[in-house]
Image: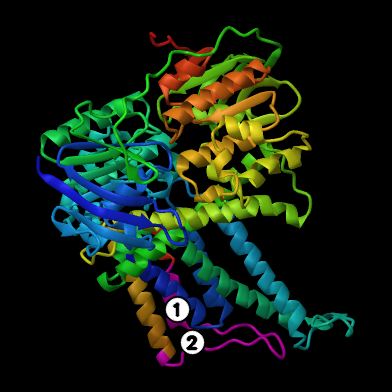
Amino acid sequence: MTTLARFRNFSYWYPETDAAALLGLDLDIGDGFTLLTGSSGSGKTTLLRALNGLVPHFHGGKARGEAELLGQDLRRMTPRQMATNVSLVFQEPEHQLVLPVVEQEVGFGPANLGCSAKEVRRRVEDALATMEIGHLAGRRVSAISGGERQRVAIAGALAMEPSVLVLDEPTSQLDEQGARALRQQLERLLGLGISVVAADHRPHRLPGAVDQLIPLSSGRLVAAQDPPEWPARVSGDRPYGEVAWATDGLAVGHRLPILEEIRLQCRRGEVLAITGANGVGKTTLLRTLAGLLPPLAGSIERLPGRMAYLPQDPGALLHQPTVLAEVAQTTKWLGLDCTPMPLLQEFGIEQLLRRDPRDLSTGQRQRVALAAILVGNPPVVFLDEPTRAADQSAREMLVRALDHLAERGAAVTVTTSDHEFADQVGDTVLVAEERNVRPRRRAAG
Amino acid sequence: MNPRALLLWVGAVLLLSLGSEDPVYRLLTLVAALLLLVRWRRPGVRLTPIVWWIGAACTLGILFNFVLSHTGQDVIATLPDWLPAIGGQLTVEGAAYGVDVALGLGACLLAAAALAAVIDSQELVDALPRQLQRTGAALGASLTLIPRLRQSFMAVREAQSMRGWRPRGPRSWRAVAVPSVLSAIEGSVLLAEAMEARGFGSGRRTPAWNWGWRKRDVLVAATSGMSLGLFSLALILGRVGGWQPYPQLQLPGIDWVPAAACLLLLVPGLIA
């Protein structure tokens, strides 16, 4: 195995923080497929950023020790210089797309590298075909779904034809088809001698043959642990209560229907999970059910009273200076008389009470946002992609929390491209496809 | 449309609108700009909000001049002197000059809007000279901040209202404004990081999209160039007369050379 990257006693601190994001790393990363594991906030993203020099060159802060990639000193080489060799796909695709149209966006990197217009076009076409999104070529980035944006971001990285591909949570928003396409492409790239370094909370969606496993915890290398078993469905049979919401002949969409003739209902005490491919209209359906979008046709009957809603981007909720203040804000607005501590403990964020929510990792933010909307036991809950960037323990906490919510009589509706999660949490699992929503056959086990 | 042809046309509209105070020339350039937007805007670009915002800006321009100028012989009404700034005579000449200013402002704003409505920011960046491309790409990316901010505002307002937030006075909007702005800034930093990681600014960037010069692009460029040339010539020869409605309103004078320059700007809208 050839050494790709070499870290010696490497430590890094983000600006204005005392805690090291990476501490005393002694590590050789070889070629082939390297998988970084660890819980949210363990330092995976920082290490990935260090691989192309974004840490420390872009972020500032303090770096100590040695860091090399392909024999080049990462503390001297800038990300721009590294871009010819290393291509990085970030965790949040919506924030990394530069240009307004998909094909332009995918061609942005090769154009920056000075490829000819003909070469840029070839690479764009290849990358779009690889990610099976050729049909999106002329679409505007703002008009495609979160999962489709993730595929566009990966296509943009592939179009740079790097010798090292670095992926941060590349499957977090991908549907089965997208994840399969990515896995096949990564296997092909590995076969061509291109190295891949990735962090993902669902590593089974990435190539199975891992050449090197790097487990991280609090910025340090730790001993590898066996991945926890993914438990079968945990919820028991709960008695359902009254109908919390029901639709009749519902059509949803923006001007034109993307899903129609929907007849659904969710009862109190029930967890309804809706899966489906990227861009099929899950978010539009959820927003319509929650009353945030008007139906194009048909009707929705809802129980009067509070509804809780988690948007795909948790940043939309977070504005208070501390985690505790963020959760307390909901109780203040709604005039609730309850203490948020049990919920914070349930989500494993009681240690973060005094932290600014925006300084947390994506997975931790997601948990804070969940706690902020679920405080006070809302009777009707809508969650859009709640497992986004969630590590295994966070997913298990979420499953337990939703089970408890349902036990207490809440009607919970979840849209997710995470089929395992849907199977585990849903009393009823539906799939949105072919302009309708229908029951999904539950996976075995 | 070829972005370089469009840039030339926009340059001509700006010169003709700002190079003369004659309302006839300004009206012609405004019509040309509006016609181009109507005929050449990209699919999906809505004209109504553009016209509404520019119309509002022009109306404000007319109103300001009307109530603040107090000059001219034809008095329509008189506001009490004790009213600060607006107290005094309201005249036909003040209103007429306001209309003239609004025509120039409207033409310039419509021409600027054409840059966003007819072509993509990426096409614009690629049309710039190589030395300006880095600045242009940064500008193009920063322009995406505006729709991002709007999307962010909508998403935050939606999410917070589901969490119990209700608008109760200006301070209550903090719960929406702060996360909207923070998300937009955070998004911009992440975007800058992504651009850096993708080699932006390494100095070797080549235009990704080569647009051919079709006949109508050549015609747009040629007529815009001729318009620029004719108007510049008219300026040098002193044939672009200034127009002043004060002290008494009079009809604007028209010279065939600058008028022809204005008419040439109509060509792109007519050949779409």
Q: Which callout, 1 or 2, points at the residue further toward the start of the chain?
A: 1
Task: Residue at 41%, 58% (x, y): give it.
Answer: A14
Q: Position of residue A98 (x, y in %)?
A: 37, 53
Question: The residue tagged with tag 1: helix, strand or loop?
Answer: helix
Mark 2 is on which residue type? Val
Mark 1 is on which residue type? Leu
* Quarter residue B244 falls in: bottom right
Determine if residue B38 is in view.
no
The dominant secondary structure in magenta is: loop
Screen quadrant of the C terminus of chain A: top left
Task: Residue at 37%, 32% (x, y): give it.
Answer: A201
Q: Is residue A214 magenta?
A: no
Looking at the picture, tell me which residue is in the foreground, A241 or B148: A241
Q: Position of residue B98 (x, y in %)?
A: 67, 77
* Quarter residue B250 falls in: bottom right
Screen quadrant of the N terminus of chain A: top left
**Magenta region, residue range:** B236-265
Q: Nearer the viewer, mark 1 or mark 2?
A: 1
Real-space Cα separation, disc 1 to disc 2, in angstroms: 12 Å
Looking at the picture, tell me which residue is in the foreground, B242 or B202: B202
Question: The residue tagged with tag 2: helix, strand or loop?
Answer: loop
Determine if residue B150 is in view.
yes
Q: Position of residue A212 (x, y in %)?
A: 20, 35
Task: Residue at 68%, 54% (x, y): give it.
Answer: B174
For residue A175, side relative to residue A285 (left or right): left
**Placement of A235 over or under A168, stated as above or below:** above
Looking at the picture, tell me which residue is in the foreground, A113 or B79: A113
| Residue on which disc 2 sits | B240
| Residue on which disc 1 sits | B15
Label 1: chain?
A: B
Number of other residues with Cα within 10 Å of mark 2, as a class: few under 14, some 14 to 19, many 20 or more: many
